[in-house]
Amino acid sequence: MVKKIFAQIYIWLILLFMYIPILVLIAFSFTTSVNVGVWTGFSFDLYPALFQDGEIMAALGNTLIIAFISSAVSVLLGTTGAIGAFYSKKRAMRALDSVNQIPVVNAEIVMALSLTVMFVFVGSYIFRGANLFSFWTLLIGHVVLSAPFVYLSIKPKLQQMDPNLYEAALDLGATPRSALYRVTLPQILPGILSGFLLAFTLSLDDFIITTFTRGPGLLNGQGTIETLSTLVQAKIKKGPIPPEMRALTTIIFLVVLLLVVGVTLYRYFHKDKKHSRRRMAR
């Protein structure tokens, strides 16, 4: 009994340490003070001001474009990699799993420096001194960061899937491609959605790889690409963070919360459908 009480207290303390700063930030998004901790009255003024700030909107647009595209590419690579490894021989599957673990456990600064050296080498010796740093190098960096996590999200769903379903579809006359689209992908769809959200979140707040691999392009035109993380870093060097960022943080938190709730509800109803089908089959 005492152990349970201490365990619950420990869990609640961790949750408080995690969410109190976020709740404080949300609360101060409804006041126009520059510094957090100074309350100048309840107001919604920061939210209209947020959408009128061109610099923040450009950084937000860049961040979302990179996050969506890199997440889609990461899901494609991670899904095909997980399916290919799952249906490979045990020795090949173990090798692929080991290779996939390296970017996950590796320090992000090592990955960022490695990508930078590679892009400089390719630009200097293959493209004769060309500067390759642009949206494409930034996209490659985010895909390299996210794809291994997508692989890890999908692999357990493949292991939970009945291996006889795919072969049964082939025996009933389905082509390998048709069996993949109609049998395998629906079974691992929750893992794909989780992988996409994880990749999106990793790309959304990435700073180190973004700083090392970005170049001119996107909504900044000929200027260096600014994302939310790099913009906040630049603002901190000059002075306090713009108060409009508190409103943006609140919106992002609520959107992510709705997505998590949506995925959870989808999984819950998906499980209920499976249980009901099994009961009807019995």
Image (cartoon, grey):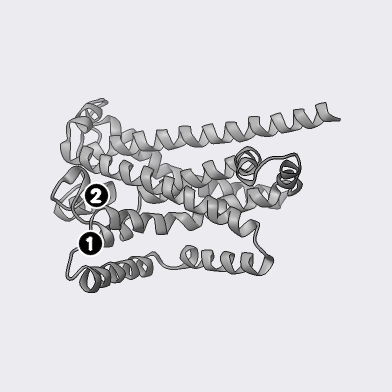
Q: Secondary structure at mark 2?
A: helix
Which residue: 34% across, 70% down? 114
Left-right relation of 272 to 30? right
Q: Which residue corresponds to the image point at 62% horizontal and 40% vertical from the top-left?
A: 178
Question: Percent position (x, y) of residue 63?
Answer: 30, 45
Q: Nearer the viewer, mark 2 or mark 1?
A: 1
> Whole-percent x and y of residue 48?
22, 26
Quarter occupied by the C terminus: top right
> How many labels, in total?
2
Q: Which residue is mark 1?
A: 132
Q: Position of residue 131 (x, y in %)?
A: 18, 64
For marks 2 and 1 on the same chain, the one whose residue lies earlier in the sequence = 1
**Amino acid under label 2?**
Val
Mark 1 crowdedness (10 Å alpha carbons): few <14, some 14-19, many ≥20? many
Mark 1 falls on what kind of element? loop
Report the disc number at residue 2: none
Whether residue 223 sits left or right of residue 123 in the image: it is left
Q: Please state which amino acid type lies under the numbered disc 1.
A: Leu
Label 2 crowding class (10 Å Cα cut-off): few <14, some 14-19, many 20+? some
Q: Is residue 253 left or right of residue 98?
A: left
- Name the residue: 52% across, 32% down: 262
Q: Position of residue 136 (x, y in %)?
A: 29, 54
Q: Nearer the viewer, residue 101 or 20?
A: 101
Quadrant of res 179: top right
| CA distance separating discs 2 and 1 | 25 Å
Q: What residue is at 46 percent from the left and 47 percent from the top?
A: 18
Please say if 115 is above or below 153: below
Q: Quadrant of residue 81?
A: bottom right
Name the quadrant containing residue 69: top left
Residue 202 showing in the rendered view: yes
Residue 232 - label: 2
